[in-house]
Structures are given as structure tokens and as C-alpha cells.
Image: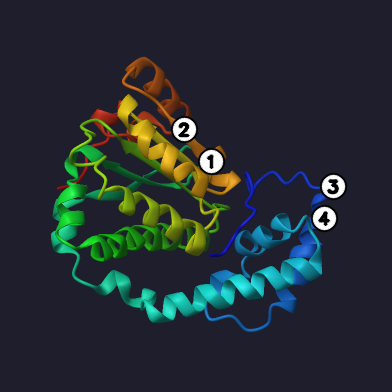
Amino acid sequence: MLLFCLFSSLLVLVVNGATEEEKQKAIEELRTKVGDVPHPFMKEDFYLVRWLIATEWNMADALELFKDASKQNIKWREINKMDGIMKEDWAEFKEKFPHYMDTVSKAGQPIRTGNVGEWDIRAVAVSGKLNAIMRYMELGMEESLQGILKIRMEGKNVTRFDFIFNMDGYNEVQHGCTQCMAFYVALINSYERHYPGFCDRIILFNSPPSFEVVLSVIKPLMSADTRNALEVYGHDKTQWQKRLLEVVDASQLTPDYGGTFQRKQ
């Protein structure tokens, strides 16, 4: 398993008192040292800075970590044909496990949203389709990455996405069963191994007390960066709506999220 020492915001770097100019020079140096890469985004600032922060801006260590992690990630992408994942037929899963990325935060970051109550995780787990739904979840991660890259091509300094999910309808039978735990473990492991640090905020609201069981299982698997990104709110609408509106304009939130956005059918 890859172990990543991840980081907080990529927009504010507080490292050993280095100036922004010194940090940018370090990024440029690492860019020249990594050599050829299979994906252009691997040479972008937002990707390179991850390894420098993880190694406290030690160039030799950052280069070694970059090469080791990238080699394993590239191999994973090739084996799992990730470059073609968005061309596959996902109609069945999109109907049964809908999630969306059609809005942005106040910071201009793409937002991944969904309603857990619409999902029947147990049905998939007991039917032996856990690998299939995990690939579908990785489709969502890949779409989020591509969303970031698309926005960056427009000249905007966006480096991460937000993950905001409505937990209303969560129950121990369909979502918290013993068989379901394998889904949550696989989800966190895949994110930490293959898309580390790309999520700025993970906001779960309308979360029932019973979800704490799942959190107790997956939190130890999270990097420090992911744990810091995680925010869990109960059913107190005044509390979670206040937080959502701090991050996202009401025009970018659907009514069940406390906003006015109408999703196209």
C-alpha cells in the first residue's frame, strides 16, 4: 500500500518559512527532473507540489516519492484501463447509484454530490458486484480529476474538488451492514492510493449516529489530509445549511441541499 503524507490547502503553503518565489523555483526544478510522464497533468504545479510538501521540500526525497508513486499509479491505470473508463456503459449504475458533478463552489472548485439514501449498497455487496461498483466509484474520481483539468485549461487556478453528500436515508441494513464495510474500505483505499489529495472538502450532512460505526472503520485508513477535509453534520438543518452556504452559493445547491439549483433531467 502506498502511504502518503498529504497536505492541507495547495493555495497556501507554509513550509519552513520559504518564500513563494523559492517554492515556485522548487516546483520548476522538480518538473525538469521527473522526465517523461504519460499524462500531462503529472507535470502541472498542482500535482508536483504534492510530493514537495509530503517530503518537506526535500528535492531528492520528493523526486524519489514521485517516481515510486507514479510508477505504481501508472501501472494501475494501465491494468484497469482508466483512460477509457468514461467511454464504458455505466447506465445501470448511474440509475441505481446516481451522483453528480454539475456545480461549483465559491472558490470555483467542481463539486461531487449525491444522496446516499438512494443507494442500496447491500444489494450490490451480496450479489457479488463489489468490484463493479468500485470501478464506478473510480469513474467518479476520474471525472472529478478531469473536471479539475478542464477548469485549469480555462486559466483558472483550481487544484481540488469538493465532495458533498446528503446522508439522509442512511440505514444499517442497506448501508451499514457487515458486507457493506468492504465497500467503504475499498473506496477509501482507492482514493488514497490513486487520487490522493485531490479532495479539498468532504462534507456529509444529515448523518445519523449509526454512521459513526462506518467512520470508526475508515478513519484509520485516511491520510491526515483526508481526515482534516472531513466534516460530518447531523440532521440539524440550521447547522449544515449554514456551513454549505459558506462554501457554495445557493444557486449551486439543489433544494435538498438548501439551495435553488435545478438539475437538468
Q: What label does residue 16 carry, if any?
A: 3
Quarter of image, res 4:
bottom right
Label 1 to label 2, Cα distance in Å? 9 Å
**Residue 77 shown left or right of residue 265 in the figure:** right
Answer left or right for 234 relative to 129.
Answer: right
Locate residue 83, reporting x and y percent: 38, 76
Residue 66, above or below 104: below
At horizontal 76% and vertical 44% (from top left) the residue drawn is 14
Give the color scheme: rainbow, by chain, secondary structure or one colour: rainbow
Name the front one of labels 1 and 4.
Answer: 1
Q: Can residue 206 be seen in this view?
A: no
Horizontal and vertical percent for residue 182?
32, 53
Q: How many labels does the image show?
A: 4
| Amino acid of disc 4 | Glu
User: Which of these two is toward me, 129 or 151?
Assistant: 129
Disc on the earlier residue, 4 or 2:
4
Q: Residue furthest front?
A: 178
In depth, the one of 110 and 174 nearer the eye is 174
* Residue 227: mark in rendering: 1
Measure the alpha-carbon separation of dots 1 and 4. Answer: 30 Å
The dot on residue 231 is 2
Q: Which of marks 4 and 3 is nearer the N terminus?
A: 3
Mark 3 or 2 closer to N-term?
Answer: 3
Q: In the shown orientation, is residue 248 left or right of residue 52?
A: left
How far apart are the alpha carbons under marks 4 and 3?
Answer: 13 Å
- Frontmost residue, 235 versus 101: 235
Q: What residue type is labelled 2?
A: Glu
Residue bearing the label numbered 4: 21
Mark 1 or 3, closer to the camera: 1
Q: Which of marks 4 and 3 is in front?
A: 3
Pointer 1 local density, CA inside 10 Å: few below 14, some 14–19, many at least 20: some
